[in-house]
Image: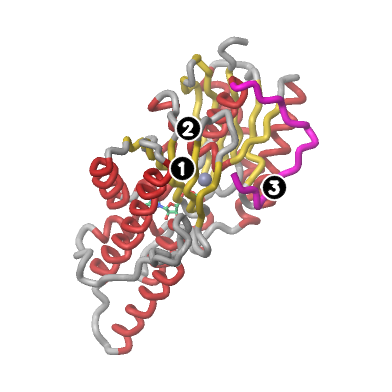
Amino acid sequence: PERPVVMGIESSCDETGVGIVRWVGDGTLELMADAVASSVDEHARFGGVVPEIASRAHLEAMGPTMRRALDEAGIEKPDAVCVTIGPGLAGALLVGVAAAKAYAAAWNVPFFAINHLAGHVAVDTLEHGPMPPCVALLVSGGHTHLLHVEHLGKPIVELGTTVDDAAGEAFDKVARLLGLGYPGGPEVDRLARQGDPTAVVFPRGMTGPRDARHDFSFSGLKTAVARFVEAKERAGEPVPVADVAAGFQEAVADVLTMKAVRAAQDLGVDTLVLGGGATANSRLRELAEERCAAAGITLRVPRPKLCTDNGVMIASLGAHLIAAGAQPSSLGAATDPGLSV
Ligand code: KG4
Ligand code: ZN
């Protein structure tokens, strides 16, 4: 059809998502359904996503989430089924891919294997329309990537990634050090508002002249926070938790936005797109706005519900690929937990 209805299934981490979009032409999409079930609460007491728990939760949630999405969109079946093929947790990916293949075969519609990372970028077109050439910064519990996107129908180039922890993961680990709950990002964000970001200054990883220009490192920062907290406790002094949270958050936001703006300038593009759950961070957003405005770069940030993992992002990229003439994937396509863009 001229305006195909595309379904996306996502199960790479702890969110089971089924999203449905309609291609309305000229790089523009319309949202028809966004059903998500999360197992985040089941992982909380472990302080991180437990793969076995995630897989089981996907298995239980897939049917009901699919039903909800179809009802919400008011359709019996889509024109194409897309699914996250990687990167992600091996067992979790298998559940979504098996479901997608089964639905595509039963409905007799084409099947498309989709890269999760590229999906985080494509979802922005739902809100902000056609995507110009851009740099994308993806930050979540599982990823920290700088990407160069020329066109959503074409391969995306990875400029850099983290050499150790993901940005959101660093938030989760520091939150644990400070005795806060999981996921730690929102808690650190809240606490940081009561602190002074200049009271304790933490190191900015991978920002030296000889460091890879577009890569990130957050494990040194996490260790610095741990050392600081230990030293205070050893000295019997109270830990200034709000100042530590603010200083840590400032370091992360500083490095992420500095490198993202620099990448856009290096590549000569005037648009920066943010994606991933950690883009909810208030200081990251503030600093990104400030620095993009100063550099004459247009900043595009999808609304929070679209930034976290969901099926809509997979459907969105699928719709752009289909419009660009991509051929369907084989029903024999295998999951790829370590897939890069
Ligand atoms: O995209 P997402 O929901 O799941 C994946 O990891 O794929 O992202 C969750 C991550 C967690 O690490 C969480 O701590 C972080 O995003 N996060 C935040 C904030 N809200 C969520 N990090 C910093 N500040 C926030 N406000
Ligand atoms: Zn993600």
Which amino acid type is marked by label 3? Asp
Residue 116, image x, y percentages: 58, 41
Check mark 1 vs ligand 1: CB closer than 8 Å? yes or no. yes
Residue stretch in magenta: 324-341
- Of labels 3 and 1, earlier in sequence is 1
Report the residue marked by disc 1.
308
Q: Is residue 210 left or right of residue 78?
A: left
Q: Is residue 334 magenta?
A: yes
Which amino acid type is marked by label 1? Thr
Report the residue marked by disc 2.
123
Per the model, the C-alpha gap separating discs 1 and 2 is 10 Å
Question: Which residue shows up at 46% across the image and 20% down it?
Answer: 28
Visible residue check, residue 254: yes
Badge 1 marks a residue whose secondary structure is loop
Q: Is residue 223 magenta?
A: no
Which amino acid type is marked by label 2? Val
Question: Which residue shows up at 34% across the image and 51% down it?
Answer: 257
- Of labels 3 and 2, earlier in sequence is 2
Examine the rendered structure and indicate whether residue 265 appears above or below residue 226.
Answer: above
- Of labels 1 and 2, earlier in sequence is 2
Report the residue marked by disc 3.
336
Residue 337, image x, y percentages: 66, 50
Per the model, the C-alpha gap separating discs 3 and 2 is 21 Å
